[in-house]
Image: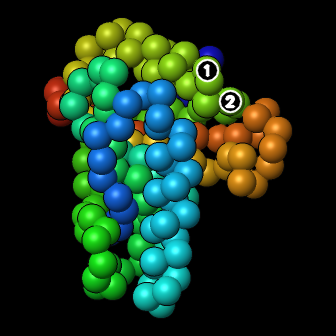
Amino acid sequence: MNDISLIDVEERPTVGIRRRVPVAELPAFLEEAFDTVAAQVEGAGAHIAGAPFARYRGAPSDVIDVEAGFPLTEPWSGGGDLVVGALPATRAVEATHRGSYTVLRETYEEIERWTGEHDVQVREESWELYEAGPSSDPDPGTWRTRIIWPVAAPEVDAG
């Protein structure tokens, strides 16, 4: 079982690429988006401030509304066709998935059980922070994905 808890998230400026992507094409989209965004950030002299993210909006279906990119130390002013945004300040459920992306759904199922047991309602958006993955180590046993799922109700203490 993963550690699941309520946390308060601080807003972080971001830059990325947003698309509607078929689920089967998600891994290729994320890889391409991360490479493209990192190159543009570096070319503009901006600074990445953390792990790459994928932000999902709306209810899951066969096609996903996803934004992929990086948090920055300062808001993006580099121009281009990138989406300027922020990971919002919010109360959220947090869990860390360890292992392959092929079993990531199991961690989401644990979160859904936890929210049901604790009477917590989540929004129809979430994001994943890829803290360790294939680019850092080919062994899926070392991969670490932090899931942040904003809470809709109730207003509860994070403690």
138 and 114: which is toward the camera: 138
Amino acid carrying mark 2 in the image: Ser
Q: Which mark is residue 86?
A: none
Name the quarter where the C terminus is drawn.
top left
In space, the residues marked 2 and 1 are separated at their CA atoms by 6 Å
Which residue is identified by label 1?
A: 103
Q: Residue at x 36, y 62 (%)?
A: 16
Describe residue 98's horizontal placement relative to residue 52 as left or right.
right
Circles 2, 1 touching at the beta carbon (< 8 Å): yes
In terms of depth relative to the viewer, which is nearer, 67 or 111? Answer: 67
The residue labelled by disc 2 is 100
Q: In which quarter of the image is residue 138?
A: top right
Location of residue 148 with respect to 69 vertically, above or below:
above
Q: Give the residue at x 71% y 54%.
A: 135
Q: Residue 122: x and y, percent?
A: 25, 27
> In front: 157, or 120?
120
**Above or below, comparing residue 119 to residue 59 in the picture:** above
Q: Is residue 53 above or below residue 61?
A: below
Query: Could you tell me residue 70's position as x and y percent?
Result: 45, 63
Side of 132 relative to 20 (left or right): right
Mark 1 lies on a secondary structure that is helix
Where disc 2 sits, the SS reads loop
Amino acid, disc 1: Val
Percent coordinates x, y for residue 154 in the rendering:
17, 26
Number of marks: 2
**At 46% across and 78% down in the image, what residue appears?**
41
